[in-house]
Amino acid sequence: MAEIAKTYFQCLFKAEEEGQYEHILIGVERRLAMPFIKEEIWETLTSMGATKAPGEDGLPAIFFQKLWHIFGNEVSSFCLQQLNGEMEVSRLNSTHIVLIPKKVHPTNLSQFRPISLCNRSLGKCIDKAQSAFMPGRLVSDNALIAYEILNTLKKKRIGRKGLMAVKLDMSKAYDRVE
């Protein structure tokens, strides 16, 4: 069963063609290219929920926060070597994926939404129109925007150019990463 699920989601997330994403990073590319520093390790650690989402080692953030005075230098050194490209990262380039049901009683894999832990830089690359799974944004925000757009379409009575609305299958909206 695990192999079937793995194959399904690998096919789902495989890119069909190379995209053009340079426009996403305008303004942040220089900051993303800067070397990481020790202060950022501590800042990131203290911004994490103390008892949320333990890593693959099973240790929550509170473990490292409370014992930082004992092994903070070693942890910082390890992290900086990884982050600044001085050490192989392939074994750390993994995450746990949890399948969240899209409906009450799912019967096949397409009725699950895979959720994984992603780094904090990802939010800067996500469009402002993306509202689900982003702090301070609600899925209902887009429903309100859609209502306003449809209301505008309904009121447009003059001019030669027509307007059009397209209804999308929202059950698949978050299934693709491209």
Image (spheres, grey):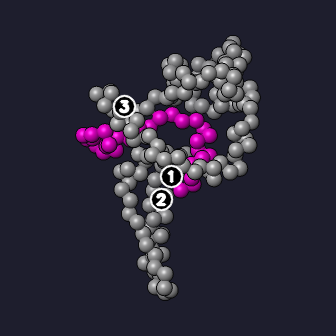
Quarter of image, res 108: top left
Q: Is residue 75 left or right of residue 126?
A: right
What amino acid type should be assigned to the residue bearing mark 2? Asn
Q: Earlier in the sequence, mark 1 or mark 3?
A: 3
What amino acid type should be assigned to the residue bearing mark 1? Ser
Q: Secondary structure at mark 1?
A: loop
For residue 172, which numbered disc appears in the image? Answer: none
Per the image, the residue denoted by label 3 is 6
- The residue shown at (46%, 28%) is 96
Q: Quadrant of the N terminus?
A: top left
- The residue shown at (64%, 28%) is 45
Q: Secondary structure at mark 2?
A: helix
Query: Eyeballing the image, is 44 above or below 16?
Result: above
Query: Eyeballing the image, is 24 above or below 144?
Result: above
Q: Earlier in the sequence, mark 1 or mark 2?
A: 1
Is there a contact, CB below 8 Å, between mark 1 and mark 2?
Answer: yes
Per the image, the residue denoted by label 1 is 131
Any part of residue 174 in sight: yes
Chain part drawn in magenta: 102-129
Task: Say if the magenta span includes residue 126.
Answer: yes
Q: Secondary structure at mark 3?
A: helix
For residue 142, which numbered disc appears in the image? Answer: 2
Q: Is residue 142 left or right of residue 73?
A: left
* CA distance separating discs 1 and 3: 27 Å
Query: Eyeballing the image, is 158 above or below 50?
Result: below
Q: Is residue 166 left or right of residue 35?
A: left
